[in-house]
C-alpha cells in the first residue's frame, strides 16, 4: 500500500485523468472500467495517462469494504492482457490510500501508439467523463501515432538548444588533423569538381 494519500496527490473530483468507481462487482461496471482504461491510454488531453480509483464514489468519498484481495488485484490486471484492449495499455494495479481508507489504484500510462481500442471501439476522456471518440478525436490520435513513428533522427528535442551543438567539428576542428592543407587544395582543384 502506498503511503501517500491519493486524495492529496490526485484530487477529490473526477477529471480527464482521474476516474472514481465505487466497486467493480457488476459486469457493466467492469465494462466501464475497461472503457476508462482505453480512454486514459489514448490520452486525448496529452496529460500522460491517468488513474482509476476503485473504492471511491462519484462525489470523491471513499467506500467501505473495498475488495483489495489478491484475486481482485489480478482481475484488474487482467484488463491489460485479456485481448479486449488493443494496443495493450501500460497498466499497473496496486492498493493505495484515499482519505485514510484502502482503495485499488489502476494507473494507466499514455500509449505511444494511439488510438487504443476497447472491444474495437476508441474511447477518450475530453473531461471528467469517458466517451466514444468522434472522427476528429481519432484523427488527433492517429496524427500523434504517425508523429511517434518517425525515424529516430527526425524526432525533435524540445529541450535542445543551439549551444548543445558541437559546431567545432563542423567548422574544421577535426578536418585539419586528418588532412594537410595541400591535400585539401588538391582535392578542391581536381578534375570533375
Image: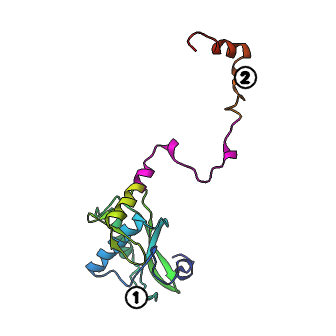
| Residue 41 visible at all | yes
- On screen, residue 128 versus residue 190, left or right, reads left
Q: Secondary structure at mark 1?
A: loop
Residue 133 x, y percent position in the rendering:
33, 68
Instruction: Tally the numbered discs.
Output: 2
Question: Residue 150 in magenta?
Answer: yes
Residue 124 x, y percent position in the rendering:
37, 69
Residue 24 x, y percent position in the rendering:
33, 80
Q: Is residue 56 above or below residue 122?
A: below
Q: Is residue 73 above or below residue 8?
A: above
Q: CA distance from mark 1 to mark 2?
A: 75 Å
Q: Secondary structure at mark 2?
A: helix
Q: Residues within 10 Å of mark 1 (few under 14, many from 20)?
A: few
Q: Quadrant of the C terminus?
A: top right
Which residues, given as a range, are shown in magenta? 144-167
Q: Which residue is mark 2?
A: 177
Q: Is residue 187 above or below residue 3?
A: above
Which mark is drawn over residue 65? 1
- On screen, residue 154 versus residue 126, left or right, reads right
Q: State which tag comes first along the sequence, 1 or 2.
A: 1
Residue 103 x, y percent position in the rendering:
45, 81
Residue at image position (40%, 51%) is: 146
| Residue 105 visible at all | no
Residue at image position (49%, 67%) is: 47
Amino acid at each position: 500500500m502506498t503511503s501517500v494519500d491519493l486524495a492529496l496527490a490526485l484530487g477529490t473530483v473526477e477529471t480527464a485523468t482521474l476516474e472514481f468507481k465505487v466497486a467493480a462487482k457488476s459486469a457493466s461496471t467492469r465494462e466501464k472500467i475497461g472503457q476508462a482504461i482505453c480512454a486514459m491510454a489514448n490520452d486525448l488531453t496529452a496529460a500522460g495517462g491517468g488513474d482509476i480509483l476503485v473504492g471511491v464514489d462519484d462525489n470523491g468519498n471513499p467506500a467501505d469494504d473495498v475488495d483489495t484481495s489478491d484475486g481482485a488485484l489480478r482481475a484488474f490486471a487482467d484488463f491489460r492482457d485479456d485481448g479486449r484492449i488493443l494496443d495493450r495499455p501500460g497498466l499497473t494495479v496496486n492498493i493505495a490510500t484515499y482519505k485514510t481508507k484502502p482503495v485499488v489504484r489502476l494507473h494507466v500510462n499514455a500509449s505511444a501508439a494511439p488510438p487504443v481500442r476497447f472491444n474495437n471501439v476508441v474511447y477518450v476522456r475530453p473531461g471528467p467523463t469517458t466517451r466514444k471518440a468522434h472522427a476528429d478525436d481519432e484523427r488527433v490520435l492517429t496524427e500523434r501515432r504517425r508523429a511517434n513513428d518517425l525515424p529516430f533522427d527526425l524526432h525533435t528535442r524540445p529541450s535542445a538548444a543551439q549551444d548543445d551543438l558541437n559546431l567545432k567539428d563542423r567548422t574544421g576542428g577535426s578536418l585539419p588533423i586528418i588532412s594537410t592543407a595541400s591535400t585539401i587544395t588538391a582535392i578542391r582543384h581536381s578534375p570533375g569538381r
